[in-house]
Image (tube, rainbow, N blue to C red):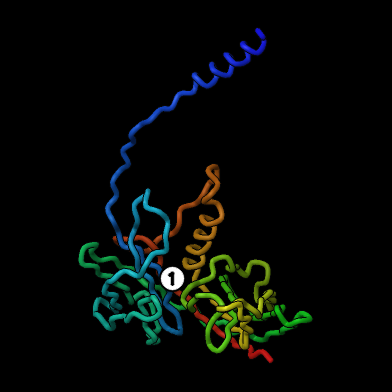
Amino acid sequence: MRRLLFFVLSIGWLVSCEVVSTRTVSLPTVSERLVVNGIVSNLGMGVFVSKTAPVLEPSQASSLLEVTASLYKNGEKIEELSKEGGLYTSKTKWGYSSNHTLQISHNSLGVASALLEALPVVVPITSTNLSYNKDKSEAIVLMYFKDIIGENYYAYKIVAEANGVPFISDHIYRVPFRNILTDADFESKEKEIEFRQFLLKEGANNQRIKADKIKIYLYHLTKSTYNYYYSLNEYDSFNEDAFADISPIKNNISNGYGFVGACAIDTLTITLK
């Protein structure tokens, strides 16, 4: 009986020693700023504009901010971008260079801008090869391209589609930062890249949708554009590790955050039979 009483009293002592402390912490106030991310290319230009969010605001997908997006050359306005597909876009092939500036104007957040870069040359996809599994629910796709002389940077992606509708919500101006590479180990040689691509997906009412085309994109990036997406990939890989030594994400937006990069894009479509 004494042992039981001692055990009960011991539990009571442990519970009574638990202390709950409540403290009020003042977070620093940070002014809202424009966030601009986009790409200029040989096929045109696409830019997504949002704004910074408070630290304690629940994470959610950003929506396109209402702004005026304008392109300038040597200080003279030459085009106002239009809204299309959730982006501010231009399909004009301006031959972008350091003489071009993108300017984003918002009625309360002010004006942000990015000085653009000259485009690299297009590196073509030279050939592809495709092999199915037995039930044709997926395929192995091989893509080949020839690296050009000099220091070069690339990105690539593959998108299946059915009746003109992509399996994933994506656009040509979204660089796949998990699929970036340098030519350090294949300088001036042919490069083979292998994809595993699913060809079926579930639609409404459990309907199985079969892909009828595969689109392949090869991006030839400028060095600064590669460095931005490399830093983005590093941040995304380690943002859940409290002890990770993370390099800061690159930024080329004046009076804002984000990056407007430059690349040359080659595309190739495989029709499935």
Question: In the picture, which quadrant includes the C terminus?
Answer: bottom right
| Residue most extreme to the right | 134
Amino acid type of the residue tagged 1 in the rendering? Gly
Q: SS class of the residue under badge 1?
A: strand
Q: Residues within 10 Å of mark 1 (few under 14, many from 20)?
A: many
Quarter of the figure with residue 181: bottom right
| Residue 218 appears in the picture as rendered | no
Residue at x-position 24% and y-position 67%: 106
In this picture, residue 236 sits left or right of residue 195: left
Q: In the image shown, does 112 or 166 lie closer to the viewer? A: 166
Residue at x-position 58% and y-position 86%: 162
Q: Position of residue 168 (x, y in %)?
A: 54, 75
Residue at x-position 63% and y-position 81%: 208
Q: In the image shown, does 60 or 141 lie closer to the viewer? A: 60
Q: Position of residue 246 (x, y in %)?
A: 51, 49
In this picture, residue 6 sits left or right of residue 130: left
| Residue most extreme to the front | 1
